[in-house]
């Protein structure tokens, strides 16, 4: 009986083994690297955990060194080992190569790499490819946000060459992302694959020597193997490119390995910034704790030479890749008609929370947007500064108030709520030193020496520089927070030629009266303007005639109306008083002379005649009030006219110049183009003038009738010739004068800040008063196109009041005058007219004098 039971047990075991299905999984990793070691241990743990819990299905791992991966080797492994799924590949070149072979064998392939930019028709070219990664677009966007936060204007990109457009794709993404934040790539360095060079140190040294000739000191390492990055930073540190003025930004391909590299490698990267995939959200989960304990134990046993035995993001992703396969196998367990295509579709439809994050696919790639950690290498470790997500960027904007400070060796970080943004010593630019000072070009042939004046010595270094622009530069330099050694030179050429010398890096900057124009901003970076600038039309002027200045306070209309009101008031006073007042009676000649004298003397409040009637007193009271206002206004207006000498321009305006076909002078090419293209002056009517004294000569010779000058130049010219010329401000505005630096130079931004400080504390205003504003003699002169004469509108109400008062009193007197009482008003008027007629006839000798 026991023998029968023994054979039954044997047969049952054999039957169970016959029912157990085994799935072969091909692993393509470089087991000699830290990443390969972590991935191999993680996938073995995942496979072992699955095999321990599954009674019907097992998985076996077949490892192939990725360095020996070829199309034929992949196909041979798939065929010989009966591989159902391929996992691995950290470069897109490897993934594309294996995907070709796997596609022919209809075997799903899970790749840890993704192209920077998805190739066209990718699902049709590699239909069995699953990418457990995202393309580089989100990572590049994070790098661009870092560059924008620090306001770096130029960067240098570095990448290790790779097939299938890995390098070109990342570079294209970076170039586009930086363009959106106003930054340009000054130079793109492409290093050969480290496996293809026998002496990587020499290759890197030659490339770094090339980089030292560039101005930018912001280096973005886009894509590199750990071996190439190790050589790169070691040589860069020896050449002084890792230090105060340099900034290194590391992509995730390098930063993700910082936990595993030895201390000598990470110390050479000190101060570098990097982005690292966030992998800490599952740290507290029991599944992660179990995996971590298993991984730590096995990794220490198999690789005791490694300093750090903890798993990184690559280990977590490798663990999740095995789980992706085993979950798909479990879902296919009850399906008798399984196929590679079904396995592929089930894996693509997976949706679970793995150790590396959410595992869900869209278009063959992980759908979850990555979260990156912004880190800084400090000493032999790295420190997290902030978190970054594609939708919200950094946790908080870097441009907020600082409220907490942390000091990390050479880097100073300020915490703005949840964001640490480094207020770094690194400028990202090659800063001047005493041995290599800032090379500044100064225009030697300026039109107006007030702005830049060069006194040449026997040697170039003995030249003396003075002028308004030079003083502003020195004042601004004194406000910089760092020492800025510099040297001036006076190259030949036009102003545009000097700006192009800055653009081609012959000079670091130019200082002088350079106008900020839109087309010039394409080549250089200007500071904020230190002078305002607009177009001024300078024309000859003549002084006003002073012999008739006493008439100017009133217009002719006002003089006529004033005389009329005066005569009307005189008539009213005489009419009201001549019947009852002896001083206004007697011969008509005496009456008229008395009335005239009384009225005119009232202008000066000097009348002495006695007034009998109250209505006459009312008329005189109103008239004296009018006289008081008139005399006060006249005196004030005449005083202002006599105090300031009036200059009247000979030329009316721009249209007058064009209508009379007169010539105008100008200095700069852009003003000539403006006068010709915008103001529509004829080309032959525009005269180029190269020196300030030539303006006076051209005016005196009548060669030009006017000149177009920028406002600062006009101030200097009119200050010198204030008695002969005057200026009219045009509506055209320019950018003003500024200092020009190379594109991306942080020194331009520092000078802009200093110039604003000079303006705010009044230093710039005092310099303008000293060098540009008119002298005391010229400041008392004033240009006037029209006399500021008072018109009838100014006194209309007063005249109406005086006229109304006189008229009302006159009419009332006519109604109340009864002699005889039955006379009509017309008869009274006729009787009033008789004495005038008699007086006129007496003068003619035809009628005797009548009492």
Image (cartoon, grey):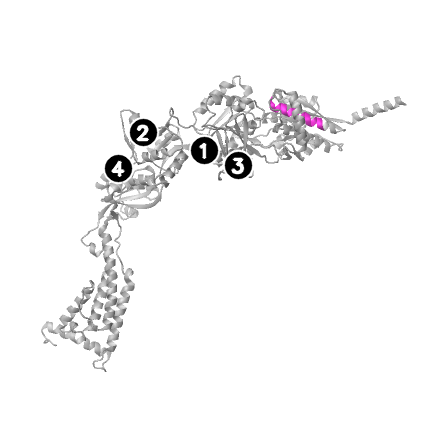
Q: Earlier in the sequence, mark 2 or mark 1?
A: 1
The quadrant the N terminus occupies is top right
Q: Secondary structure at mark 3?
A: strand
Q: Residue at x 46, y 26 (%)?
A: 243
Q: Residue at x 48, y 39 (%)?
A: 401
Say which residue label 1 marks: 153
The dot on residue 492 is: 2
Q: Is residue 47 magenta?
A: yes
Q: Which residues are magenta?
A: 33-49
Question: Can you give x and y, in whole percent of width and height, for residue 358 in the image?
Answer: 64, 35
Q: Is residue 731 magenta?
A: no
Instruction: Report the Cα–Cα distance between label 2 and label 3.
Output: 50 Å
Q: Are the residues at dot 2 and dot 3 in contact (C-beta closer than 8 Å)?
A: no
Q: Are the residues at dot 4 and dot 3 in contact (C-beta closer than 8 Å)?
A: no
Q: Secondary structure at mark 4?
A: helix
Residue in the foreground of this view, choosing between 167 and 525? 525
């Amino acid at each position: 009986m026991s023998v029968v039971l023994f054979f039954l047990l044997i047969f049952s075991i054999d039957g169970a083994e016959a029912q157990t299905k085994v799935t072969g999984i091909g692993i393509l990793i470089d087991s000699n690297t830290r990443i390969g070691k972590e991935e191999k241990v993680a996938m073995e743990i995942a496979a072992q955990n699955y095999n321990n819990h599954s009674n019907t299905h097992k998985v076996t791992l077949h490892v192939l060194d990725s360095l020996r991966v070829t199309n034929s080797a992949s196909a041979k492994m798939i065929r010989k080992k009966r591989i159902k799924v391929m996992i691995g590949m950290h470069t897109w070149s490897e993934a594309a190569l294996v995907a070709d072979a796997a596609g022919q064998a209809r075997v799903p392939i899970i790749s840890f790499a993704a192209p920077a930019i998805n190739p066209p028709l990718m699902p049709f070219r590699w239909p069995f490819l699953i990418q457990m990664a995202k393309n580089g677009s989100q990572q590049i966007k994070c790098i661009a946000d870092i560059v924008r936060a620090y306001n770096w204007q130029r960067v240098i990109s570095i990448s290790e060459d790779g097939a299938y457009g890995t390098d070109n794709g990342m570079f294209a993404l970076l170039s586009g992302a930086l363009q959106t934040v106003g930054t340009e790539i000054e130079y793109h360095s492409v290093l050969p694959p480290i496996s293809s060079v026998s002496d990587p140190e020499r290759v890197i040294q030659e490339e770094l020597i090339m980089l030292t000739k560039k101005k930018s000191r912001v280096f973005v390492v886009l894509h590199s193997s750990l071996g190439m990055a190790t050589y790169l930073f070691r040589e860069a540190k020896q050449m002084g490119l890792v230090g105060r003025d340099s900034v290194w930004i590391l992509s995730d391909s390098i930063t993700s390995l910082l936990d595993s590299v030895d201390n000598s490698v990470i110390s050479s990267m000190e101060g570098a910034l990097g982005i690292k995939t966030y992998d800490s959200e599952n740290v507290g989960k029991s599944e992660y704790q179990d995996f971590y304990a298993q991984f730590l134990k096995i990794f220490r046993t198999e690789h005791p030479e490694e300093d750090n035995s903890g798993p990184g993001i690559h280990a977590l992703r490798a663990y999740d890749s095995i789980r992706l396969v085993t979950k798909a196998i479990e879902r296919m367990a009850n399906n008798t008609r399984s196929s590679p295509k079904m396995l592929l579709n089930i894996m693509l439809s997976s949706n679970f929370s793995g150790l590396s994050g959410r595992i869900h696919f869209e278009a063959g790639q992980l759908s979850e947007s990555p979260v990156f950690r912004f880190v800084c290498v400090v000493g032999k470790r790295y420190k997290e500064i902030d978190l970054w997500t594609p939708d919200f960027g950094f946790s908080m904007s870097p441009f907020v108030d600082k409220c907490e400070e942390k000091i990390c060796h050479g880097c100073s970080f300020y915490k703005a709520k949840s964001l640490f943004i480094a207020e770094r010593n690194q400028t990202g630019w090659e800063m001047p030193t005493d041995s290599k000072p800032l090379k500044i070009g100064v225009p030697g042939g300026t039109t107006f020496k007030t702005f830049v004046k060069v006194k040449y010595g026997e040697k170039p270094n003995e030249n003396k520089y003075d002028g308004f622009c030079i003083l502003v530069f020195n004042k601004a330099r004194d406000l910089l927070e760092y020492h800025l050694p510099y040297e001036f030179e006076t190259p030949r050429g036009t102003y545009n030629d000097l700006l192009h010398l800055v653009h081609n890096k012959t000079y670091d900057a130019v200082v002088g009266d350079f106008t900020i124009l839109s087309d010039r901003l394409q080549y250089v970076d200007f500071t904020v303007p230190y002078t305002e600038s607009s177009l001024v039309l300078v024309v000859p002027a003549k002084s006003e005639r002073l012999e008739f200045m006493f008439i100017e306070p009133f217009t002719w209309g006002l003089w006529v109306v004033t005389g009329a009101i005066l005569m009307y008031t005189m008539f009213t006073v005489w009419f009201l008083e001549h019947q009852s007042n002896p001083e206004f009676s007697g011969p008509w000649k005496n009456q008229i002379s008395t009335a005239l004298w009384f009225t005119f003397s009232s202008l000066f409040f000097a009348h002495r005649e006695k007034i009998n009637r109250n209505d006459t007193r009312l008329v005189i009271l109103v008239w004296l009030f009018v006289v008081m206002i008139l005399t006060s206004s006249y005196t004030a207006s005449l005083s202002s006219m006599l105090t300031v000498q009036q200059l009247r321009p000979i030329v009316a305006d721009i249209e007058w110049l064009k209508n009379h076909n007169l010539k105008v002078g100008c200095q700069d090419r852009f003003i000539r183009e403006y006068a010709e293209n915008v103001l529509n002056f004829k080309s032959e009517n525009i005269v180029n003038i190269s020196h300030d004294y030539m303006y006076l000569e051209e005016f005196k010779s009548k060669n030009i009738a006017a000149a177009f000058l920028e406002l600062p130049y006009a101030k200097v010219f009119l200050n010198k010739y204030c008695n002969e010329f005057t200026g009219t401000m045009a509506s055209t505005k320019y950018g003003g004068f500024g200092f020009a630096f190379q594109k991306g130079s942080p020194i331009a931004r520092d000078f802009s800040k200093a110039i604003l400080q000079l303006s705010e504390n009044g230093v710039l205003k005092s310099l303008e008063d000293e060098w540009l504003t008119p002298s005391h003699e010229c400041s008392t002169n004033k240009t006037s196109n029209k006399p500021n004469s008072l018109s009838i509108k100014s006194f209309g109400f007063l005249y109406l009041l005086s006229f109304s008062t006189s008229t009302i009193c006159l009419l009332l007197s006519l109604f109340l005058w009864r002699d005889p009482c039955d006379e009509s008003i017309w008869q009274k008027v006729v009787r009033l007219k008789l004495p005038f007629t008699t007086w006129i006839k007496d003068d003619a000798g035809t009628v005797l004098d009548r009492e």
